[in-house]
Amino acid sequence: MKRRGFSLIELLAVVAVLAILLVLVTPAFNSIASSSNITQAANMLSGQIELARQLAEVRNRSIEVRILKKNGDSHFSALQLWWPSLGQPAEKPVVFPQGMLLNESLSPWLSKMGSGTMAAGGSWAGATYRSFTIRPSGELDPRPSAGDRAQVFLTISAREEPTPSNYTTIQVNPDTSRPILYRP
């Protein structure tokens, strides 16, 4: 009995089918990875705001949430909790996952925050930041005006564009500083 193998044409057909499947599946995997990174960045931001709220209440001291933009970067991509009364950090900076940023065009509250530059020393020396303060009572400082109360939110996306296809928005209650995530 003669053993028969696969012909070259059969092997090429299988390789071609696999290549087509790979081309079709790759964008889906990239989309899943991007969605996962956006969710992770939003959870980081929300978690740090919640931690700041709790620290302010427990220590009975205002705490500042600084949203950082490293030298040479065009976007805000990290945050740090800071004790303004002590002039020192409360926590190490938390960096968003690779490629994730705070979308400035979809974060109107950012323009109403305080701003500054990180002091010399450390890996974030010279970085610019936007900040808001959480009081021990849970209120935000600067206090949003009545017309701006609905504008107290920050948006995380993979790219800076007016209408990204994938993003998460974190709204912060101006009275309690509790963050709420919205994922369209």
Image (cartoon, rainbow, N blue to C red):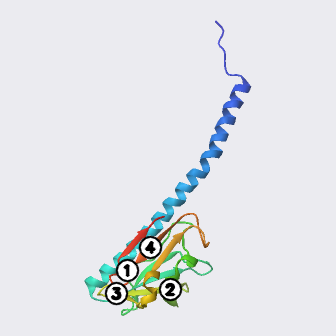
Which quarter of the figure has residue 4?
Answer: top right
Circle 1 is placed at which residue position?
173
Spatial separation of the CA atoms under disc 1 and disc 4: 10 Å
Identity, as a three-letter code, of the amino acid under mark 3: Glu
Spatial separation of the CA atoms under disc 4 and disc 2: 16 Å
**Reading the chain from its start, which is encountered first: label 4 or label 2?**
2
Mark on residue 130?
2
At a point 71% along the width and 31% down the height, the residue shown is 12
Q: Position of residue 15 (x, y in %)?
A: 67, 34
**Reading the chain from its start, which is encountered first: label 3 or label 4?**
3
Mark on residue 28?
none
At a point 48% along the width and 76% down the height, the residue shown is 154
Q: Nearer the viewer, residue 164 or 24?
A: 164
Spatial separation of the CA atoms under disc 2 and disc 1: 18 Å
SS state under label 4: strand
Identity, as a three-letter code, of the amino acid under mark 2: Arg
Q: Where is residue 18 in the image (x, y as percent from the top left)?
A: 64, 37
Regarding residue 122, the answer to whether it shows in the image is no
Q: In this view, does 133 lie above or below 7?
A: below
